[in-house]
Every structure is written in structure tokens, then in C-alpha cells.
Amino acid sequence: MEARPEKMKKSDVLGIFKRLLGYMIKNYKFSFLLVVICILITAVATMRGMLFVQSLVDDYIVPLMQSASPDFSLLAKALVGIAIMYIIAIVSTYGYNRIMVNVSQGTMKKLRIELFTKMESLPIRFFDTHAHGDIMSVYTNDVDTLRQLFSQSIPQVINSLVTMAAAFISMLMLDVPLTVLTLAMAVIMLIVTKKFSALSGKYFQHQQHDLGAVDGYIEEMMDGQKVVKVFCHEEQAVEEFRKLNDRLRDSADKANRYANLMMPVNANIGNLSYVLCAVFGALLALSGAAGTTVGTIIAFLGLNRNFTQPIAQISQQMTFIVMGQAGANRVFELLDQEPEEDHGYVTLVNAKEAEDGTLTEAETRTGIWAWKHPHKDGTLTYEKLEGRVVMDGVDFGYDDDKMVLHDIRLYAEPGQKIAFVGSTGAGKTTITNLINRFYDIQDGKIRYDGINITKIRKPDLRRSLGMVLQDTHLFTGTVMDNIRYGKLDATDEECIAAAKLANADSFIHRLPDGYQTVLTGDGANLSQGQRQLLAIARAAVADPPVLILDEATSSIDTRTESLIQAGMDALMEGRTTFVIAHRLSTVKNSDCIMVLEHGRIIERGSHEDLIAEKGKYYQLYTGNFAE
């Protein structure tokens, strides 16, 4: 189980919030400016209404009560003016809330796009070392905390700060002693808010992490449900989930316990401030203090409420602010991950071949591919893509302190079939991952058509390779779409031809809608063998010069294997092929078989040569060829 993150430092919290606010303003400068203007209009209108109370009492109500023939025309005119002011405030309030909905949803959209774009740029190593459910939690739970922060908390905080500033100025204009008393109570409220925020902040960070752990465990159990049931581990799975869920409940309880106390505590301190101002103001009025009238006290009490309420509102929003900061921290952690490095400059292009063998670049697909190789002297050379692969003294380790492969040497000529055999952990799949540059080697060289693969752009390198993995993954979509995934511009006819080559055409026709049958849940409505056949068809439609078959027939029964073997042979014809398989029928006819043990090639040769040596391969062939 992953350790919880350490509590964020104050500088980190401020940095995250600053970055978050800057992110929103960067994309919506004009909209955000309109929001601030609307908030200012609302605050000014509200304060104008509060100050009018003093005038209403002292300049209108009291004189009218003392007049023998009161004239209400001036009062009516003043009330109409205030009514118009409040209508403007209502429109402004609606305006900034409506704009913030657009800003928040638009920001969420851009943020999700950036997250997905960043995820697609990350190396395989990242996904090998991070739980997929935890990554999903960033897209769902953590991004959702930002929605609340953008749409409500940030505008509410801005509105509260502007209201407090306007109220403070208005209070100073009315009565300085009462203003000092109000400020003293406000300082107490701010201290309480700071204390409770500090207590809840670290637990919100834990809560988001624990939520990711719960999501990750649920996804893992869903994927492995068959295994759970086969081994009758339902009770153990539930028990483990209870532990994770209890941990989440504990962190969420502590986070919300302190956060939920802020609002009522501050509200009551605000009520106390109101009462003290009322009592102190009454004493001042009774003592005959200059400028302290009944209207002044009534207006000031309204302003006192307008000054202390925003503090209580900010404290209420602190729950969402602190939670949003915790979510933003995880979002930015993903956005700040280092993308997969690619310093390659050799590209794969369509080419035309002249009678003398000279290659030139073509604008349209010709069926001939070439490596476009720019040199330091400004010249360009074109090397025909043939599929010649050489590994020379390759050392590799997922960790620099622990090597997995040692001094790997292999030479695959175009059209050759190279097989890897050996026990689990011997390094078979790792070798094929290095050819794809899913990982970079620590020492040695890998050359592709005589070019160091570090010079080839990774997308171009991978485009020239076809892979059929042991763990087949099918996407939501039609059968035709899944085959076409190997070559997005392939025609229906090319996809059908590829399916026939893999002997998948017959079972596809038996599906409810044939090639238009929609697959969901990773092709859950197909057998494992059928899914594997579609993966082979997907590789076939790409028509690559190099094939990597990693246990490609491991999920296919003997009868199905015999049916597709001819198709596989046709697919491998003229292509350099690397095969990892346990079934000897798939490796016996290889040009070269390499036996790996503990990351080293201990034997190499044809099937007949290795049998004659009576070494490790002989042992595997005669009865121990199983992992």
C-alpha cells in the first residue's frame, strides 16, 4: 500500500492556489474581469443600501414623524433610487454567477484535455509504477473538487473580500469606535479560521489519496473478479476493502470534522460582535456622543453583519478551498510528470525506388518505406525500411542498481524469424520492449536497418513495428473499428483481408452484426481465442516489416492454433519476426531460437542444433517446457 503524502507546506499551498487561479485567469481573462466588475457593482450597491438606512431614519422617518403635514414625495423618490440600485445588484449577481458557470466548466474541459494529453505523452514506466485506479481518481474525484472551487468558492471569496472592504470603509464613515470593536471581533474570527484550516488541511490531502486508493482497489477487483471467485477469496477481498474504506472514513471524518466547525463557530462570533456593537452603540447614543444617532446605530449594525458574514462565508468555503487544493496538488502532480523523451530525428516516409535502387521521398503511399536521415552537414539520405535488427552488447535494468538483461547480442536479417524461450523472468518480453523503445537501455546499441534506434523518432519507430501481445486489449467500438486500429486509413476491404489472413473472418460472420458488431468491456462477449484473433488481424492490417508476437497464440486452443498457423506463416512471410511462445509448434521452424536464463542468452541456434546440444532447450523440449 502506498504511503500517504506528507502535509503540504504553506508555500506549497499558496503556490498551488496561485497556479490554480492563474490557470483560470489565463484562459478567461475577459470573463474573469467581468466577474470582478459585477462583484464590485454588487458590493457597492449593497453598501449604498446599508448607508441609506441611516438617511432613511435620520433624514426621512424622524422628520416626517415630527411634521404636521408630512410630504412623502422625497422619501418615495429616494426609495425608487434605492430600488433601482438593488435591481442593478441583482442583475450583477446573476451575471457573475452565470459567467462563473461558463468559466468553471470551460476550465474543467481544458484541464481534462491537458490531463489526457499529458497522460498520452507519459512513458510506459509511469503506468507500470502507478495504480490505474489512482490515475482515474485524478480525472474524477480530484477534478471534481476543482469544479466546486472554480464555480463557487473562488467567486464567493472574491465577493466576500470586496464586501468586507466596502463595509469597512462605510463603517469608518459612520462610527470609528464601533468600527474598532468590529475589527477586534473579526480578528478573532480570522484566527479561528486559520487554526481550523490548518487542522483540516492535512486530512483533506490524506482523504484525496485514500479515495484514489479505494478507487484503484475497486478497479483491480473488477478486473480480477474471475480470479477472486476461482480461489474463493471474496471474504479476503471484502476485508481488504473494509481496511481501505475505514482509512478513507477516518481521514474524511477528521478533515470534515474541523472544516464543518468553522462556519458555526465564526457565525456565533459574528452574532456576538453584532450584540456587542448594539449594546456599545446604544451606550454611545444615550451618552450623547457626537454623530451617534438611532439611524447611525441601525445602519452600523447592518454593516457589521455585512462585515462579519463574509468571514463566516469564507470559512464555510474553506472546506472546498482546502479540498480543492488537495485535489489540485494531485492534478498538478500528474501534469508535472516528465513526458516521454524523444530526441530522434530520423523519420519514416513513403518512398519511390528508381531502377538503379535510388530512393526518393513520395507524397502518396507507394508501399515502399524509407528512413529519412538528416546529417549534420545538411545532407539527407534515405535508407530502405527492411526490418534488419541488431542488438549489440545490450545491458538493461528497470532500476540502474539491478540489471535485468546482460550483454544481449542478436542479429535478425530481413524476413528471419527469431524465437525467444525461457522461464518466467528470463527477459524475453523485456527484449521486445526495448526494440519498441518503451524503455531505454543502459549500455550497448540497438540498430534498425543500420540506424541507432535512439536516432529514430519513437512514433516512426513504432509505426514500423507490429505487435500482438499476450494480454489482448479491444476498444469499445465495432469489430471493424478494432481491426482498423492497426491502420486508421485502412479500407473495409483491407480490414476484411486482414481478418481472413488471421482466420478471424469466419467467426466474425457468425456474430450478430458481423463486422459491425459493437464490442464493449474489452470484448467481453468474445472468447479469449477470438479476441486474440482480432489482435492478430489488427497487426496484419498494419502491414509492418517487423512483427513482435508476445505469446500471441497462448490463449488459442490447439484446433484454433492449427487453423491460424497457416495465416500466421503468411503474415510472417518476408517480415522480420520476433516470437515469444511456449508452444514448440510456434518456434520449431524459427531461423534462430534463443534460450534466455536470468537475463542472458545461454543458447542460440536452430531447433535441430539445440536439440543436438542437449542443453537447456533440449530439457524444455523433452518435458519441462512450461513456466
Image (cartoon, helix red, strand yellow):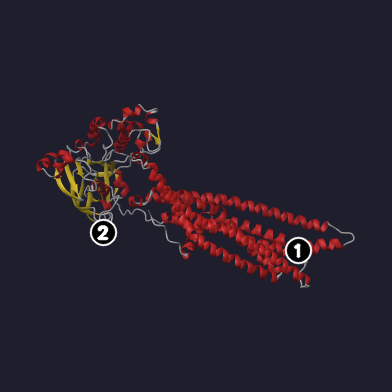
User: Does residue 528 appear left or right of residue 118 in this picture?
Assistant: left
Q: Is residue 459 left or right of residue 246?
A: left
Q: Position of residue 184 (x, y in %)?
A: 63, 69
Residue at 60%, 68% (x, y): give it. 187
Asked which secondary structure carries label 1, the reply is helix
Q: Nearer the viewer, mark 2 or mark 1?
A: 2
Give the image quarter of residue 378: bottom left
- The number of numbered discs placed on residues in the rendered structure image is 2
Amino acid type at image mark 2 = Asp
Pick out the residue farthest to the left: 612
Near mark 1 (Cα within 10 A), the count class, few <14, some 14-19 or many ≥20, is many
The mark found on residue 54 in the picture is: 1
Q: Nearer the viewer, residue 306 or 28?
A: 306
For the residue pair 112 and 361, the one nearer the viewer reads as 112
Which comes sooner in the sequence, label 2 or label 1?
1
- Residue 526 vertical position relative to residue 356 in the rendered view, above or below: above
Q: Calculate the distance from the C-alpha at mark 2 to the C-alpha at mark 1.
A: 78 Å
Q: Quadrant of the C terminus?
A: top left
Disc number for residue 587: none
Q: Give above or below for 221 relative to 271.
A: above
| Residue 9: percent from left, percent from top | 46, 64
Is residue 68 found left or right of 200 in the rendered image? right
The residue lying toward the viewer, choosing from 41 and 9, is: 9
Position above or below: 513 against 120: above
Q: In the rendered image, which residue does mark 2 sit on?
A: 401
Report the amino acid beneath label 1: Gln
